[in-house]
Image (cartoon, rainbow, N blue to C red):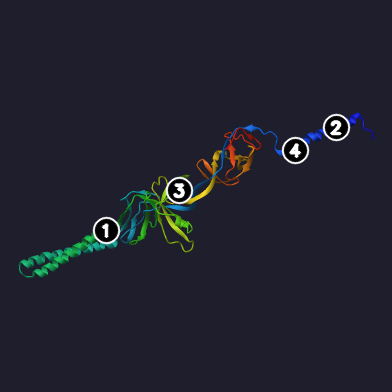
C-alpha cells in the first residue's frame, strides 16, 4: 500500500503520543512526580512504659450495714419507715407489743412487793428478838434479788421500741405490721452511706501484685466518673470453684456514689510497653481510624490503625504503627496521601 504524506504524519503523531504516555507512566512508577508541598506537625513514634492494668467489675456496698432486730418477741404494731427512706441515728424503726415482757415485769413487781412486806415484818420481829439477824439478812438478800429482777424486766420493755443505731438508708424491709417478730430476727436492714466499699473478685494470677492500701481507679458508669479508691482488704482464701479472691476497695469520698451501683475497678499490676500518640493526630476516613505516616522522601501515606485505651490527650495504638516511624497531622485535617512535607521532620 502506498503511504501518502498525510498518512505518515498521522502515524508519527500516534507514535509520539504513545512515547509521551509511556514516559509519564514510568515517571509515576518511579515516584519522581512532584508532590504538593505542605506544612504539618510531625512526631517520631517511640515505645514508652505505661501502667499495666487488670480490670474487674464490682458492686458498691456499705461497710456498715446493720440488721435491726428486737430482743423481744411480739407482734409488730408500728413500722413507720419504708425501703429507700433516710433515717437518722435514734429514729424509730419499729415497735412491737411485748406481751411476754410485760407479764414478766408485772410478775417481778408483785414478787418485789411481797418480799418488801416480808422485809419490813422481819425488821420488826428482829427488834422484838423474834427472829435472828441471819434470818433477816436472808430476807434482805431475797429483796435485793427481787428488785434486780424487777429492774431487769422493766429494762426489757424498752426493747419493744427499736431505733436506728446509724444514720443512713433503709435498704430492705423483712417484715410488716402484724407480723410476729422473734428475738434476734432482723426486721429491717439499714446502711450507712458514708462508709462505702466495693466488693470485687480478682484472678489468682494477679493477686500477688496487689497490696492493701494501694490506689485503685474506679469508674462509675452511672455517673460517668472515675474516682480513686484504696484496697482495704484482700481475702487470702480463693473461691474453690472460680479460683478468684475477694478484694474490698474503700471509697474515701463517695459523694454521689450510692450502695448497689455497678462499678469497674482497674488495678495497677506493673508496667508494659506501649505506642501512644496525640489524639489530634488521628483522622477519620469513612468511619475508619487512621494516621499519616511520613516516608524517607517526606511523602505522606494514610494508614489504618487499631486503637487501644485512651488516657487524656493520648491514645494507644495496638496495630498499624511501629516505633521509629514518623507521623504527621494538621489541626484542619488538611492532609492526604501523596503530599510532601515542607522542611525537615524528626
Q: Where is residue 128 in the image (x, y as percent from the top left)?
A: 4, 68
Residue at position x 45%, y 57% in the image: 208
Residue at position x 87%, y 33% in the image: 11
Outermost residue to the left: 128
In front of the other: 70 or 59: 59
Which dot, 4 or 1, sits closer to the camera?
A: 4
Q: Residues within 10 Å of mark 3 (few under 14, many from 20)?
A: some
Tell me how far mark 4 sits from mark 2, CA to CA. 21 Å
Q: Is mark 4 on a helix, strand or loop?
A: helix
Tell me how far mark 3 sits from mark 2, CA to CA. 78 Å
Tell me how far mark 4 sits from mark 1, CA to CA. 105 Å
Residue at which label 3 appears: 217
In front of the other: 307 or 196: 307
- Callout 3 touching callout 4 (CB < 8 Å): no
Q: Where is residue 37 in the image (x, y as percent from the top left)?
A: 64, 32
Q: Is mark 3 on a helix, strand or loop?
A: strand
- Callout 3 touching callout 2 (CB < 8 Å): no
Q: Earlier in the sequence, mark 4 or mark 1?
A: 4
Residue at which label 1 appears: 157
Q: Earlier in the sequence, mark 3 or mark 4?
A: 4
- Callout 3 touching callout 1 (CB < 8 Å): no
Residue at which label 2 appears: 12
Rendered image: mark on residue 26: 4
Tell me how far mark 2 sits from mark 1, CA to CA. 123 Å
Which dot, 2 or 1, sits closer to the camera?
A: 2
Residue at position x 51%, y 50% in the image: 272
Residue 138: in sight, yes or no?
Answer: yes
Amino acid at each position: 500500500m502506498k503511504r501518502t504524506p498525510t498518512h505518515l504524519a498521522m502515524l508519527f503523531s500516534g507514535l509520539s503520543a504513545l512515547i509521551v504516555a509511556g514516559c509519564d507512566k514510568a515517571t509515576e512508577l518511579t515516584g519522581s512526580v512532584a508532590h504538593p508541598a505542605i506544612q504539618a506537625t510531625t512526631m517520631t513514634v517511640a515505645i514508652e512504659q505505661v501502667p499495666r492494668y487488670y480490670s474487674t467489675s464490682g458492686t458498691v456496698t456499705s461497710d456498715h450495714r446493720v440488721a435491726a432486730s428486737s430482743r423481744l418477741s411480739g407482734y409488730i404494731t408500728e413500722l413507720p419507715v419504708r425501703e429507700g427512706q433516710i433515717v437518722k441515728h435514734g429514729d424509730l424503726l419499729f415497735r412491737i407489743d411485748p406481751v411476754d415482757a410485760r407479764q414478766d415485769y408485772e410478775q417481778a413487781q408483785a414478787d418485789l412487793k411481797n418480799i418488801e412486806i416480808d422485809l419490813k415484818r422481819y425488821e420488826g420481829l428482829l427488834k422484838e428478838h423474834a427472829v435472828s439477824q441471819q434470818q433477816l439478812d436472808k430476807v434482805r438478800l431475797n429483796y435485793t434479788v427481787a428488785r434486780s429482777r424487777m429492774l431487769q424486766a422493766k429494762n426489757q420493755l424498752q426493747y419493744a421500741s427499736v431505733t436506728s443505731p446509724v444514720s443512713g438508708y433503709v435498704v430492705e424491709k423483712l417484715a410488716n405490721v402484724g407480723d410476729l417478730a422473734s428475738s434476734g430476727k432482723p426486721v429491717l436492714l439499714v446502711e450507712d452511706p458514708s462508709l462505702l466499699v466495693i466488693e470485687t473478685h480478682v484472678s489468682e494470677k494477679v493477686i500477688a501484685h496487689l497490696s492493701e492500701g494501694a490506689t485503685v481507679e474506679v469508674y462509675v458508669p452511672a455517673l460517668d466518673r472515675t474516682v480513686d479508691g484504696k484496697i482495704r482488704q484482700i481475702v487470702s482464701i480463693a473461691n474453690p470453684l472460680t479460683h478468684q479472691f475477694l478484694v474490698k476497695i474503700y471509697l474515701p469520698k463517695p459523694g454521689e456514689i450510692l450502695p448497689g451501683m455497678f462499678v469497674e475497678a482497674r488495678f495497677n499490676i506493673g508496667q508494659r510497653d506501649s505506642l501512644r500518640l496525640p489524639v489530634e493526630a488521628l483522622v477519620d476516613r469513612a468511619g475508619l481510624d487512621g494516621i499519616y505516616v511520613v516516608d524517607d522522601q517526606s511523602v505522606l501515606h494514610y494508614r489504618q490503625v487499631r486503637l487501644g485505651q485512651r488516657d487524656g490527650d493520648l491514645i494507644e495504638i495496638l496495630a498499624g504503627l511501629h516505633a521509629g516511624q514518623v507521623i504527621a497531622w494538621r489541626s484542619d485535617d488538611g492532609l492526604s496521601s501523596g503530599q510532601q512535607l515542607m522542611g525537615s521532620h524528626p
